């Protein structure tokens, strides 16, 4: 075994002429063609002088070629660094610089804006567009369709995924080959994936859910994916008859339920629906079962840990819970202050340990030490309860985090920008219930004495620097922020005050 991740996920499918990807235009891409494309791209990367361990940062639209870039990185021993397509140039600059990316791959439309940054950082730049064209695939076209796989060990890094931090500075989660592979194998087994499975894939491929959960599980099982560029209900409904399984964030399920064409008959043949990345309301779970007869299987994970818990395949999928720790995952519910385990049925902070748990934050030893205990337990920042039957329920967060449509948003990053604006004394950014996205961003602004900040200008400043999904839906001027005796802003009071603002569809 020279390169466990590549050998077990990709190489074992070499020569297979049957479909790996079913594409929106009705065409398919076979495993053999996909692996050929990955090998050609691996040649381009190596010929560009990249060494094993170098970071390849990619902000590209979802396409078979974008997925082949992931395969190329695995085969060539490069560290894949996928980036949300919504990130602004400001946000990207930080990721490129922090990771020391050797190569940046972006859409041609972004190249002019990113080229000077790549130059300054000494990184190379290639383009890859939504339709698969671009300089990367252009160069790859003339390269051989096989590549001598670069040897790698289980502890070598396969990917870095940035997650936002409570201080406003994003942290690069270092994921090893074994982190990814062990979790994919566990999930494929737990959820009974086989080569006959056809997964309806409409998630983005720059986060754990769409890339590592959906794609790696399919690769382990040798199944295929209906590869849609994004959530598009018309297309989902058209393709569901050809699928056996689907994965999505809760918004996928609420939007499907809102469509009268989503009927019991349409999905009678389906084997499995999986939800995660954000809490699935028990009400959605129940509505889904009433409509379709299927019980959604909810699981719980993090960028740093891949998947930690899952409802059972055969046993009861209990609404509102995230199920049991997966095989090979140790899970404790602990007192946040002392770290001691709390009794069954009591709320505590969830800690997890296992082969799935990451290697730490890229070049941030202090942050790693603060969250990853010496005995291997990772402090998730999620608050949960384990009941007498062993089911885990997430009841809240010990971290200031908003999850909107499955995307994580750390208020601090937004508050830092709002606080800099003329006339703003301070701000508090909170998540409030939202009918479509689960939660959305609301900003409360306190003016400097005597000042009248221009809220539209304040909002424009945030828009210029932050990805669209992080923009506050509304800014509200308030006289002061509620504080406790320690002077800390009581966001729970604010969340309660504004809870009904966006709750109705
Ligand atoms: C798009 N917009 C959003 C979001 N997505 N705003 C807030 N939150 C979002 N999630 C913006 C758009 O830019 C647009 O702005 C406006 O909202 C409406 O867009 P719409 O067409 O409704 O959005 P969409 O394209 O349909 O996308 C919604 C979505 C998408 C399908 C929920 O965000 C999505 O695919 N989310 C999945 C995220 C995901 O994969 N998370 C997994 C992270 P404008 O109108 O101004 O143009 S991995 C993870 O969390 C862990 C590890 C785990 O457990 O999985
Ligand atoms: P991320 O930083 O994108 O990896 O998001 C991880 C966070 O998403 C976790 O720490 C949880 O707070 C949340 N999360 C993921 N899955 C679930 C779920 N099924 N229920 C509730 N929260 C979830």
Image (cartoon, rainbow, N blue to C red):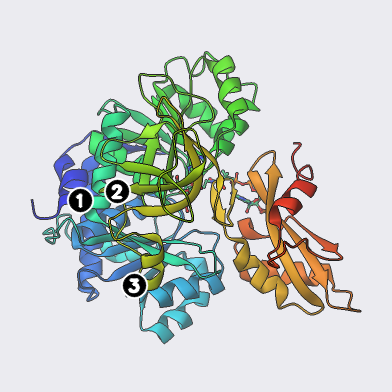
Task: Note whether residue 57 is visible.
Answer: no
The circle drawn on residue 356 is: 2
Residue 216 in view of the camera:
yes
Mark 2: is the Cβ under 8 angstroms from ligand 1? Answer: no
Q: Mark 3 = which residue?
A: 103
Quarter location, residue 118? bottom left
Quarter of the image that includes the C terminus: top right
Q: How many marks?
A: 3
Q: Is residue 399 toward the left or the right of residue 140 in the image?
A: right
Which mark is first along the chain, 1 or 2?
A: 1
Q: Is residue 428 above or below residue 333?
A: below
Mark 2–mark 1 distance (CA, rounded to whole Å): 14 Å
Image depth: mark 2 or mark 1 in front: 2
Who is closer to the viewer here, 169 or 93? 169
Decide if residue 431 is on the left or right side of residue 76: right
CA gap, disc 3 and disc 1: 21 Å
- Disc assigned to residue 417: none
Tell which circle, 2 or 3, labels the residue nearer the N-terminal end.
Answer: 3
Q: Measured from the top left, where is residue 242 in percent x and y?
A: 41, 24
Which residue lies at the image location 79% right of the left edge and 45% below the top edge? 501
């Amino acid at each position: 075994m020279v390169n466990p991740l590549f050998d077990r996920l990709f190489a074992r499918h070499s020569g297979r002429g049957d479909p790996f990807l079913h594409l929106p235009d009705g065409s398919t891409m076979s495993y053999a063609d996909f692996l050929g494309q990955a090998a050609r791209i691996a040649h381009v990367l190596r010929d560009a002088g990249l060494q094993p361990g170098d970071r390849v940062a990619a902000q590209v639209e979802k396409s078979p070629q974008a997925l082949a870039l992931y395969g190329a990185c695995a085969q060539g021993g490069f560290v894949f660094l996928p980036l949300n397509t919504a990130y602004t140039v400001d946000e990207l600059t930080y990721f490129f610089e922090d990771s020391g990316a050797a190569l940046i791959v972006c859409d041609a439309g972004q190249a002019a804006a990113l080229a000077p940054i790549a130059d300054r950082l000494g990184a190379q730049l290639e383009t890859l567009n939504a339709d698969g064209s671009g300089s990367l695939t252009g160069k790859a076209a003339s390269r051989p369709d096989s590549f001598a796989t670069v040897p790698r060990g289980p502890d070598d890094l396969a990917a870095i995924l940035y997650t936002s931090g409570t201080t406003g500075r994003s942290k690069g989660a270092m994921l090893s080959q074994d982190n990814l592979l062990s979790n994919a194998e566990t999930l494929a087994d737990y959820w009974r994936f086989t080569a006959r499975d056809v997964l309806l894939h409409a998630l983005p491929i720059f986060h754990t859910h769409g890339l590592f959960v959906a794609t790696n599980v399919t690769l382990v099982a040798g199944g295929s994916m209906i590869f849609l560029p994004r959530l598009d209900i018309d297309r989902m409904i058209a393709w569901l008859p050809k699928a056996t399984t689907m994965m999505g964030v809760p918004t996928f399920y609420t939007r499907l339920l809102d469509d009268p064409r989503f009927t019991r008959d349409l999905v009678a043949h389906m084997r499995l629906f999986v939800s995660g990345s954000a809490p699935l309301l028990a009400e959605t779970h129940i509505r889904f079962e009433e409509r379709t007869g299927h019980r959604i299987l909810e699981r719980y994970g993090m960028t740093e840990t891949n998947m930690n818990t899952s409802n059972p395949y055969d046993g009861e999928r209990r609404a509102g819970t995230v199920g049991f720790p997966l095989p090979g995952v140790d899970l404790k519910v602990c007192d946040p202050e002392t770290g001691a385990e709390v009794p069954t049925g009591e709320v505590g902070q969830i800690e997890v340990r296992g082969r799935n748990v990451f290697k730490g934050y890229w070049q941030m030893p202090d942050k790693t030490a603060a969250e990853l205990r010496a005995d291997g337990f990772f402090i998730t920042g999620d608050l949960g309860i384990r009941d007498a039957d062993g089911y885990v329920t997430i009841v809240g967060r010990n971290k200031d985090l908003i999850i909107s449509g499955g995307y994580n948003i750390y208020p601090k990053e937004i508050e830092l920008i709002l606080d800099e604006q003329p006339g703003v004394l301070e701000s508090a950014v909170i998540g409030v219930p939202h009918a479509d996205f689960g939660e959305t961003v609301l900003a409360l602004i306190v003016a400097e004495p005597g000042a009248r900040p221009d809220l539209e200008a304040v909002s424009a400043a945030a828009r210029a620097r932050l990805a669209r999904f992080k923009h506050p839906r509304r800014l509200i001027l308030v006289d002061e922020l509620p504080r406790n005796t320690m002077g800390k802003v009581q966001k729970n009071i604010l969340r309660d005050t504004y809870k009904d603002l966006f709750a109705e569809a």
